[in-house]
Amino acid sequence: MRVDKYLWCIRYFKTRSIATKACKEGKVRVNGDLIKPSREIYPTDKITVRKNQVNYELLVLDTPKSRLGAKLVDIYRKDITPKEALQKLDLLKYSKDYYRKKGTGRPTKKDRRDIDEWFIDDTNKNHEEEE
């Protein structure tokens, strides 16, 4: 099986074209060698995939016939990624600024509720002053 098709089948990439692009950009290695997307893979091959600033390491156990459900992926590959790499991923999640700065971009749902509440309060004050 081709390495790009394998990575798509075991759900490391959402589409096969994204897997092919990753291979062409040098983000995929098989047994330590840079490869082309058409490279055949066999059981016991070690695949290294660089994705989201983390090097995932996989051991090929078998090749599936087609794309798998998420629960069946572990039958065809063994994840041997070092724990340090996964901890690096956790640090990246914490270091990112998830919230946008005030006043930039579209209002969030919470911002919209706050704005609506502010306008409702203003209209209630205006009605009380008229009476």
Image (cartoon, rainbow, N blue to C red):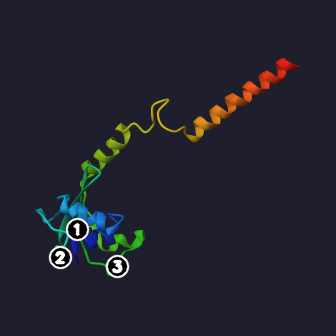
- Name the kind of residue labelled 2 in the image: Glu
Badge nearest the viewer, 1 or 3: 3
In the image, residue 9 above or below residue 80? below
Q: Nearer the viewer, residue 110 or 69?
A: 110
Query: Which residue is denoted by mark 2 in the rendering?
Result: 40
Indicate the quadrant containing the C terminus: top left, top right, bottom left or bottom right.
top right
Q: Nearer the viewer, residue 110 or 72?
A: 110
Query: Which residue is denoted by mark 3 in the rendering?
Result: 66
Q: Residue 93 in the image: x percent, y percent?
A: 37, 43
Q: Nearer the viewer, residue 74 or 15?
A: 15
- Spatial CA span between label 2 and label 1: 14 Å
Residue lying at the far right of the rendered structure: 131
Please tell me how crowded label 2 is: few (under 14), some (14-19), or many (20+) other residues with Cα within 10 Å: some
Q: Residue at x 32, y 63 (%)?
A: 12
- Name the kind of residue labelled 1 in the image: Leu
Query: Which residue is denoted by mark 1 in the rendering?
Result: 59
In the image, residue 27 above or below residue 44? above
Q: Residue 24 in the image: x percent, y percent?
A: 19, 62
Residue lying at the far top of the rendered structure: 129
Q: Earlier in the sequence, mark 3 or mark 2?
A: 2
Badge nearest the viewer, 2 or 1: 2
Q: Earlier in the sequence, mark 2 or mark 1?
A: 2
Query: Pointers 3 and 2 in contact (CB under 8 A)?
Result: no
Q: Quadrant of residue 100?
A: top left
Q: Residue 46 in the image: x percent, y percent?
A: 18, 67
Q: Residue at x 34, y 45 (%)?
A: 90
Q: Secondary structure at mark 1?
A: strand
- Spatial CA span between label 3 and label 2: 15 Å
Q: Residue at x 69, y 32 (%)?
A: 117
Total marks placed: 3
Q: Secondary structure at mark 3?
A: loop
Q: Earlier in the sequence, mark 1 or mark 3?
A: 1
